């Protein structure tokens, strides 16, 4: 498995005189761990998810950066690929769903996750079909990926243990965790000048989108 797998030798940013990389990935049964958002933030996209699949390359979805939200990754994957090749026909929503479930599990060498036949781990996500973003309920998977995302998630079970109920995480004190995170960020930001070669502040390096009051 390789991470990202974007810059093949036929990618416009790394154009090379050979175009063998895609075939090499397929011939070696390599899985590409596709993490779309971290590169989309830099204006870079895989070219393209559907092409890799048609060449026989396995793809699984990863998070790699905040937010660690698989539904968001599915949506960004579908949108970015279709934008790059300027057609919605290069891949289907089912292709993206497969990458987020069984293909990712296969990449890890696991046949007991990512699916729900007898003998597999009881990993379940229950969706509220009554949520406004899921209605009208004609094609629930499309509604979940392109509209509702995590807003419609009601319960989550991992190996049979309920970790989310009515949209609330049961296994962590989110408020305490968020407070701890903010304290850690404050310590980190205070030390930015001593770690920067030009001793710039965080406001110099990464100005806020909106000015502080």
Image (spheres, rainbow, N blue to C red):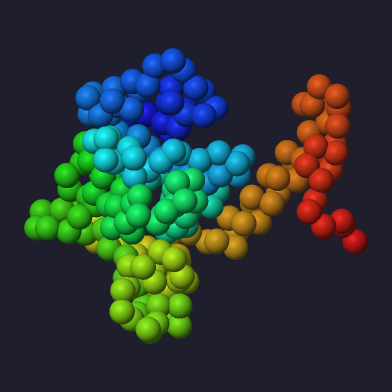
Quick one: 123 or 99, which is closer to the camera? 99
Residue 81, percent from left and from top: 44, 48
Of the pair 63 and 9, the residue shown nearer to us: 9
The residue lying furthest to the left in this view is: 118
Q: Is residue 95 left or right of residue 134?
A: left
- In the image, residue 56 sits, relative to residue 160, either above or below, namely above
Left/right placement of residue 41 relative to residue 129 reads right
Residue 33 in sight here: yes
Residue sitting at the far right:
213
| The C terminus: image quadrant | bottom right
Give the quarter of the figure containing the N terminus: top left
Q: Name the spot of residue 128 as percent of width and height, x first.
A: 36, 78
Tag count = 0
At 41% from the left edge and 31% from the top edge, which residue is drawn? 5
Q: Name the side, left or right, on which 55 lies relative to 187.
A: left
Residue 109 location, x and y as percent? 21, 36
Give above or below for 6 relative to 123.
Answer: above
Residue at image position (47%, 55%) is 79
Whole-percent x, y for residue 198 in the image: 86, 24
Horizontal side of 48 relative to 28 (left or right) equals right
Q: Is residue 186 above or below residue 30?
A: below
The answer to whether one can see residue 65 in this image is: no
* Residue at the (15%, 53%) spot, across then down: 120
Which residue is drawn at the image coordinates 43% and 26% (left, top)?
10
Residue in the foreground of this view, choosing between 79 and 12 = 12
Occupied quadrant, residue 60: top left
Task: Indicate the quadrant where residue 179 lies.
Answer: bottom right
């Amino acid at each position: 498995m390789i991470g990202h797998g974007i810059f093949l030798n036929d990618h416009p940013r790394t154009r090379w005189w050979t175009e063998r990389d895609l075939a090499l990935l397929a011939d070696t049964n390599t899985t590409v761990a596709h993490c779309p958002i971290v590169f989309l933030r830099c204006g870079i996209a895989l070219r393209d998810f559907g092409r890799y699949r048609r060449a026989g390359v396995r793809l699984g979805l990863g998070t790699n950066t905040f937010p660690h939200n698989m539904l968001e990754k599915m949506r960004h994957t579908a949108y970015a690929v279709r934008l790059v090749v300027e057609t919605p026909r290069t891949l289907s929503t089912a292709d993206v769903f497969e990458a987020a479930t069984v293909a990712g599990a296969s990449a890890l060498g696991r046949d007991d996750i990512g699916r729900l036949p007898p003998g597999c781990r009881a990993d379940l996500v229950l969706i509220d079909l009554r949520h406004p973003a899921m209605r009208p309920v004609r094609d629930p998977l499309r509604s979940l990926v392109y509209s509702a995302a995590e807003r419609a998630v009601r319960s989550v079970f991992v190996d049979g243990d309920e970790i989310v109920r009515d949209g609330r995480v049961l296994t962590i004190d989110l408020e305490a965790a968020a407070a701890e995170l903010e304290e850690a960020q404050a310590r980190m930001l205070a030390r930015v000048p001593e770690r920067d070669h030009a001793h710039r502040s965080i406001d110099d390096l990464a100005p806020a989108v909106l000015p502080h009051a």
